[in-house]
Amino acid sequence: MARVNLVHIESSGGKGRWKKFIFRLESILAFCIALHILVIAHNDNAFASNVASIEDIFRLKIDPRHDVARLCFKKEWYNQPFFRDTEETMDGTHVSDKKALGYTKCHDTFVRLGRVAGFEEILEFYQLRRASGRKINIARMGLSRDRRAPTELTEDQKLKVKNHPELVKLRKERDQCKDEIYGKEYNIIEAAKGTDLFGKYKAVVGKINNMSIKLRRERLDQALRDFHDSIDTIEINKQLDGITAADILTQPTIQYELREWATIAKLLSQLLDEVDEERALKIRAKFIRNLSRLCQRQESRWYAASHQKKLQLNRFEGSETEELRKKAEVK
């Protein structure tokens, strides 16, 4: 059970509201909120107790004279946001100590996850129902999923969005505002800050940005619908034309730069109902350790399109590749 202070919620007037949430260990790690809370707390070193290892937490027993065993946080963490946003520093991107992760950013990331996974329907938070317990609500998110589904617009589609009549009209209005500002003998646009003309210019720029986002989203939604509406017919026609199913179903090996990513990806879909309690404990501890280490690491910036930087990727698949590598070195 977690006691959480909810702030900035609807109809709260900006005041916090304490609520209690009960989470249980799920058999599929991807849906186990309790483990993800433990990962963040472990990575932040937030526990007041002297927890030496993750295994210690799962082996805790409740005193028969007491109802619960509270794994409390250090007092300095009581008023800190738990789910925090990232910030840019001189040393790169880091998790902020003070800035909470906003709903919009979290939601957009979740939607992006559905896009990358190839789901036909847009993912929404309400589809992850706690009532479903051990599985995602597939009925509400659509059964169709294809990894080849588009996740972003093509260059041709971007160009069509850019040349949309409404955007062209707004850009002309923006350019007219710029000309008027320069006509007032301002050397740069920012020099006109505080004037009505500058306010008009900024308003038009805002409209252009909002319209661009709207049109791009609509065009990508249409591209997804077109893909899922046609892909089954295309694949069936391929097989009818003599292309074997094996050729169609062959999937490329997924590559990971960071070993922790590979380990987590393998564990996320593992069903713990099929293993004994001790084995499940070890798997959960392994998941937490790798996810916690991942919080401290960063992937290299990958400029795949321009080949500005080449990465030496290590492929991890099947059993523990690191162990196989060590054995090979011994031989």
Image: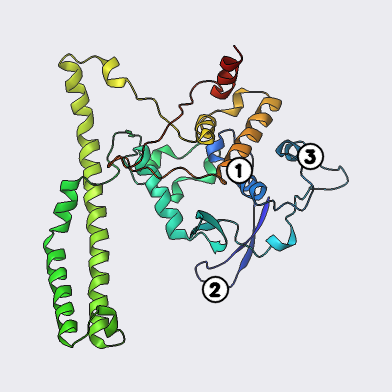
In primary-sequence order, the first of circles 1 and 2 is 2
Instruction: Find numbered disc 3 in the image and state the secondary structure of the residue it sits on.
Output: loop
Q: Distance between the residues labelled 3 and 2?
A: 38 Å
- Whether residues under marks 3 and 2 lie with C-beta atoms below 8 angstroms apart, the answer is no
From where the camera sits, is residue 134 visible?
A: no
At a point 43% along the width and 31% down the height, the residue shown is 313
Instruction: Name the residue carrying label 1.
Output: 292
Other-residue count near label 1 (Cα within 10 Å), few / some / many at <14 / 14–19 / ≥20: many
Q: What is the number of the mark on residue 14?
A: 2
The quadrant in which residue 59 appears is top right
Q: Indicate the position of residue 138 as horizontal and vertical percent values.
A: 42, 37
> Callout 3, which amino acid?
Leu
The quadrant in which residue 77 appears is bottom right
> Callout 2, which amino acid?
Gly
| Residue situated in front as seen by the camera: 222 or 11 | 222
Q: Indicate the position of residue 105 as horizontal and vertical percent values.
A: 43, 57
| Above or below for 90 versus 169 | above
In primary-sequence order, the first of circles 3 and 1 is 3
Q: Which residue lies furthest to the top in this view?
A: 331
Instruction: Name the residue carrying label 3.
Output: 60
Instruction: Find numbered disc 1 in the image and state the secondary structure of the residue it sits on.
Output: helix
| Above or below for 134 versus 85 | above
129 left or right of 158 in image = right
